[in-house]
Amino acid sequence: MIETPPEEPPEGRPTTRVEDLVGRVSVLARWLARPVGIAGRIGVVAGLAVWFLLSAPVWPDGPPWWSSAVSLVVLGAPGLWLLFHRRWLDRAFVRATELAPAATATALATYDRVRTPRTPRSSAAAGPDGAPGGRMRRAWRFYRGTVSPLRGHVSDALGVTLPFRPYILAMSGVALILTVVLLVCVPIALVLRVVLLAT
């Protein structure tokens, strides 16, 4: 006799679909964010090259050490920011994948709780219908069982979306532009260093 495998409970199917969807979106987003890390490495290398050719204290006409240190920080900042943003995006994608099942299960449980009315208790146990104590207890149970879990998931979701805020993306855009400028400045700095050594 062939045994049929047990059917998956219907309430688990939306959670599984959401997990699959979030997982695929996370993989795609991490793949799309990979150029940010590459641009960050290029920016760090370009900044170090410009710093070494123009502001390093190893040259006879080099600036003081404190000025060289400030120049190193300024020139390396765009690439370091892009590397940090890439790691931040990776952590956000992983966090979203971890939060999706719990958030979906809580939302489904809340929907079932709101849609399905509870069976009323006996009037002797419930007390008078308009008693303030009964209303307060019902309001507290509703907040503790429905509002509070959703509020926690909303806070977690807002934390996940932090690296996608407009000002964060604008800072990464400025860092990308500065990385391109540093790449253009590398041959210029090389020519200047050759001229300074020749003279």
Image (cartoon, rainbow, N blue to C red):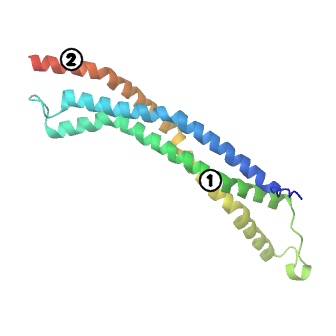
Rendered view: 198 above or below 168:
above
- Front residue of 67 and 132: 67
- 90 relative to 182 in the view: left or right: right
Disc number placed over residue 1 in the picture, else none: none
Disc number placed over residue 191 in the picture, else none: 2
Marks 1,2: beta carbons within 8 A: no
Q: Quarter holding the N terminus?
A: bottom right
Q: Identify the secondary structure beneath mark 2.
A: helix
- Front residue of 103 and 6: 6
- 121 relative to 184 in the view: left or right: right
Rendered view: 193 above or below 154:
above
Q: Earlier in the sequence, mark 1 or mark 2?
A: 1
Q: Which residue is mark 1?
A: 99
Give me the C-alpha separation between circle 1 and circle 2: 53 Å
Res 122 → quadrant = bottom right
Residue at 18 percent of width and 33 percent of height:
56
Res 111 → quadrant = bottom right
Q: Residue 186: horizontal and vertical position, in percent?
A: 28, 23
Q: Residue 187: horizontal and vertical position, in percent?
A: 27, 19
Please, what is the three-letter code of the amino acid marked with disc 2?
Answer: Val
